[in-house]
Amino acid sequence: MTNSLTRLLLVFFLLFSLVVKSTAQSNNNGTGKETLYHEIATIDSLLFQAFNSRDLESLKHFFTTDLELYQDNTGVRNYQQTVDAFGELFKKDYVLVRQLIKGTMEVYPIKDFGAIQSGLHQFCHTENGKKECAVFKFMHVWQNTKDGWKISRLITYDH
């Protein structure tokens, strides 16, 4: 009987340790996802601070040099085409301002690479004295590089 009791206790402690380890991993993943969410929210804010202030030099540092931008109404652009397009946009008479729609941002980790960010954002500008705004969907694939977080793939759609 002592062997049976010993085996039963061993199995119990083994199962108990697996449950504790699993719970600890779940808690760490939750905290890690929350931390990642706040990191991406912060870098998103900095990205569009540069965009909203028309700071092309700062803006272009948020992209990897192998950037691919996919937009439903303009097609596919690489890094240089994207930088050039932002430069042209910043020369317009009106100032286009981006704002993230509160509560729509989602962030998901990409193992050993970075994160996916998706959500809705609104762009507004004043033209002929009238404020014009539109809401679009977006997805950013962020790469955690040695130089910090950078967007390697950008998808904007539903224009």
Image: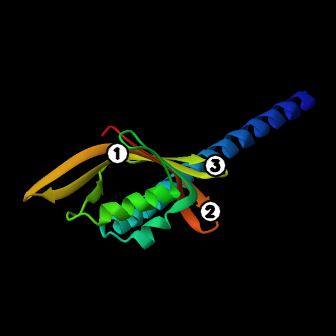
71 or 148: nearer the viewer: 71
> Is 57 above or below relative to 65?
below
The residue mark sitting in front, 2 or 1, is 2
Disc 3 element: helix
Point out residue 10 in the picture as x, y percentages from the top left corner: 83, 37
State how far apart marks 2 and 3 are (Cα): 28 Å
* Residue 131 visible in the picture: yes
Residue placed under numbered mark 3 in the picture = 24
| SS of the residue under disc 1 | loop
Q: Given contact means CB atoms under 8 Å apart, are the residues at marks 2 and 3 in contact?
A: no
- CA separation, marks 1 and 3? 29 Å
Q: Amino acid at mark 3?
A: Ala
- C-beta proximity under 8 Å, tags 2 and 1: no
Farthest-out residue, left: 129
Kindly identify which residue carries mark 1: 104
Q: Quadrant of the C terminus?
A: top left
At label 1, the amino acid type is Thr
Query: Residue at the location (26% across, 53% down)?
Result: 123
Tell me if residue 43 comes above or below residue 136 in the rendering: below
Quadrant where the N terminus sits is top right
- Using the image as rendered, state which of residue 116 and residue 30 is in the foreground: 116
* Residue beneath the point at 66% across and 42% down: 22
Towards the viewer: 59 or 81: 81
For the point 33% across and 69% down, the residue is: 54
Residue tagged 2: 145
